[in-house]
Amino acid sequence: MSRAWGLLSRYWFDGLVVAGFGAGIASINHDLSHANGPQGPLWLDIVLLAAIMAPFLFRRRFEFWALLAVPAAVAVAAPLDNRLTPDSFVIFLCGIAVALLFGQLRDPRQGIAGLVFLWATNVVIWHYDPKGSFGDVFFGGIVFTVAWVIGFLVGRKLEEADAARERAERLERTREAEARAAVAEERARIARELHDVVGHSVSVMTVQASGVRRLLRDDQQREREALLIVERTGREALAEMRRMVGVLRRPEEAPALAPQPSLEHVERLVEQAREAGLPVDLRVQGDAVELPAGVDLTAYRLVQEGLTNALKHANASRAEVLVNYANGAIEVTVSDDGKGFGNGDGGGHGLVGMRERVSVYGGELDAGPQPGGGDRLRARLPVAS
């Protein structure tokens, strides 16, 4: 159905041209029997009518010249059958259509040249018409001019609509490109942070293995070799991780020397928001459990992003942070009474990054308005993989 509608919207004018050609032939055949009608013969009038109307079918490829060919064919037909063009209403409609299309041309010089050519063609018709009068020339010129003005106005509106559509498409492409860049940046940031988390854990494992190896007795050679392999493998893994993640760091960045933040520091985060002028209530439900380092860091970043949105983008006067430990998962909710998340990006595509973080751990993220007003950012993260 959509394909048929697309074809109809594109070729409806061509269909009118074909229908008009058929109506023109029927009219010529009828008028040949009248004394004041076309002089004929019929085959000549049909050929002339085809020459007049056929250029319409090529207007997409030769926009100006195809339209110019229509009045040119009329000017040729006038001396060959001096009553064909004055008597044919179909040809008169063709003249009006040409005037409209000339007015819609993007180049105004071509449009004006086409209108002048139409006036000249009207004079040629009058010259060869034995029953023509100057009033016919004047009337035809007025009609073609009015049609040209209408086409000009419609053409400018269509150009404005096309320009608006192009701007919208360009903005959409820009937004998509920015979103892709934000996702890539957030993934790189996640990789850098996880490198610091995992690197710290591997370092601890390596140091512990080295310490235990030094405490072994002399006869525990097999255990010593196994721990030496663990220690060597840990050091090699750390070196490879530094090489791999090093390309993701900006030149001004360095590996984090302090531990990555976690939910243990959420009270400090809430206190910073309060100092910035946003009253925040913090509630913790359920029995706190030890979280994997990556999940702990992600939960902290979610609270950070929610409070940042409430402060900078939502114009909130109050916010609430809820941390809920339940059913093998942790839920983090940040709600406020503000006006929104700024289309979900806040100038930095923060929510896009949050979705990336949550998806890494197979969690769920909801962000949007609350039924009672304000907005809510809620994420659920599984504690165990």
Image: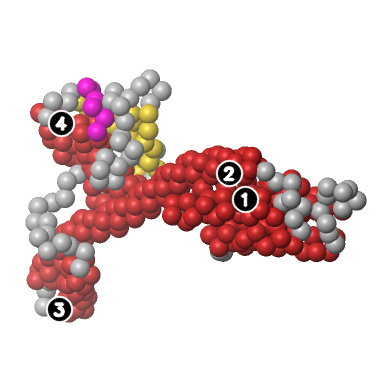
- Amino acid type, mark 2: Gly
Picture residue at 33% right of the left edge, 40% below the top: 344
Q: Could you say which is closer to the camera, residue 185 or residue 132?
A: 132
Looking at the image, residue 267 lies above or below residue 220: above
The answer to whether the residue labelled 3 contacts the one labelled 2, judged by CB atoms less than 8 Å apart, is no
* Res. 219 mark: 3
* Res. 178 mark: none
Q: Which residues are magenta?
A: 313-318
Give the mark nearer the N terminus: 3 vs 4. 3
Report the side of 226 relative to 277 (left or right).
right
The residues tagged by marks 3 and 4 sit, at their Cα atoms, a distance apart of 59 Å
Neighbours of disc 4 within 10 Å: few (<14), some (14-19), many (20+): some
* Res. 141 mark: 2
Give the mark nearer the N terminus: 4 vs 1. 1
**Residue picked out by circle 4:** 273
Report the side of 113 relative to 283 (left or right).
right
